Amino acid sequence: MIDNMMLITLFDSLYPCWTEEMLAREGVDLSALEKLVKEGLIRQEAGVYSLSEAGVAEFKRLALENFIEEKPGEAPRDRARSARAGNFLKRLNAAHLQRWGIKQYYASPALEIFPRTADEELFHVAGSELTWPYMEGKEEREMEEKFPLSGLRGRKERMAAAVERSAQWLEEKRALVDTFTPDILYVCRYDYLQYENFKGHPNDPLRLINTDRFLFSFDSGDEAEELREIGRFRRWVTFQRLVMMPDFFDIDTQEQDSICQLLLVSESEQQAAARCERLARFGTALTAGAEPFEIWTLSEEALAAVKDKREIIWELLPDIAHPVRRMSAGAG
């Protein structure tokens, strides 16, 4: 049973919103929860619980007294979606060990993408034909021409000059940088002990180099929004690959592939399977011009049904998710 006051520290920046069912699974005394609601430390709205302003202050006090590093969570505008993401993340984390790595999660991270693109210029669909008009736009073309990849040899020695070049260019193009906010970013630091000698990259605040990255976005039930989300993901991957971390983003410092996956999450397995089949009709057009990356669909139903914890994420996702577009080894 969780201590009544320490209950407040469950509401951290990764899990700012909870439902009663989620809290009960954590061993929370629901009568204690209601007591904190009455005291004004936790607010309840439409079945979703989050910290009040007074609750945030109490979290900070408890964290300081108990040497807790986490920060208090502030409820976003869509509280129900936040609680859904938290529930999904609890199940994802419980479903695999990642014994020889580190699991790093981010809730609703604000990821920079380039270029800012109007919806009508992002993609075009005609039956089973998909095109990405933004790829022919002036800004995209200029970025690709200015930041060609140079390869693995000498990339560490080129890093400082590459960072300076990207900073100068971004100063001019800042108005054209947009934001991509997936529901969850999972950065998997595989075999991290093998990479301790790498001291990091100035353009990598999330420490994405030497990792696999899994971005989870919840369904909208609308194909146009799915393609917009894929378009955001494409632009994020390309921006990181060419401008922010050239020659480091796709191949780690041990010269192994670093994988990027976008996983579109549905509630039911039937929805996830149908979604996969529908999007797969576009084939290679989904990733063309922005490879390598992968697109999968996944259901909360399938994740909740996992009984045997897997050792690593790569034993879990291929077993329960549906590949829309999967790269072969060395593709891209």
Image (cartoon, rainbow, N blue to C red):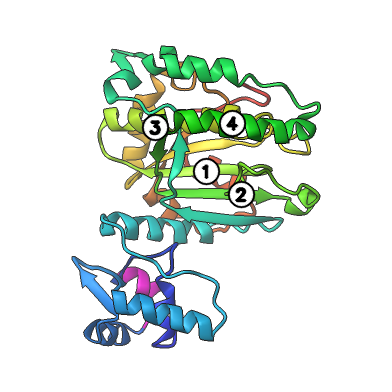
Tell me the SS state at disc 3: helix
Q: Main secondary structure of the magenta part?
A: helix
Marks 2,1: beta carbons within 8 A:
yes
Residue 188's disc number:
2
Task: Name the disc covering residue 166, or none.
Answer: 4
The kind of residue tagged 4 is Ser
Residue 283: numbered disc: none
Mark 1: amino acid: Phe
Q: Residue at x 43, y 64 (%)?
A: 13
Magenta region, residue range: 21-28
State the image quarter where residue 177 is shown: top left
The three-letter amino acid code for the residue at tag 2 is Cys
Q: Give the crowd class for mark 1: few <14, some 14-19, many >=20 residues within 10 Å.
A: many
- Real-space CA distance between mark 1 and mark 3, rounded to the nearest whole angstrom: 27 Å
- Residue 1 visible? The answer is no
Q: CA distance from mark 1 to mark 4?
A: 25 Å
* Front residue of this view, candidates 168 and 91: 168
Considering only order in the chain, which callout, 1 or 2, is on the residue closer to the N terminus? 2
Q: First in sequence: mark 1 or mark 3?
A: 3
Q: Residue 92, how many percent across, how many down? A: 49, 55
Q: Earlier in the sequence, mark 1 or mark 4?
A: 4
**Residue at the spot 30% in from the left edge and 54% down from the top edge:** 81
Q: Which mark is residue 214?
A: 1
Residue at the spot of label 3? 175
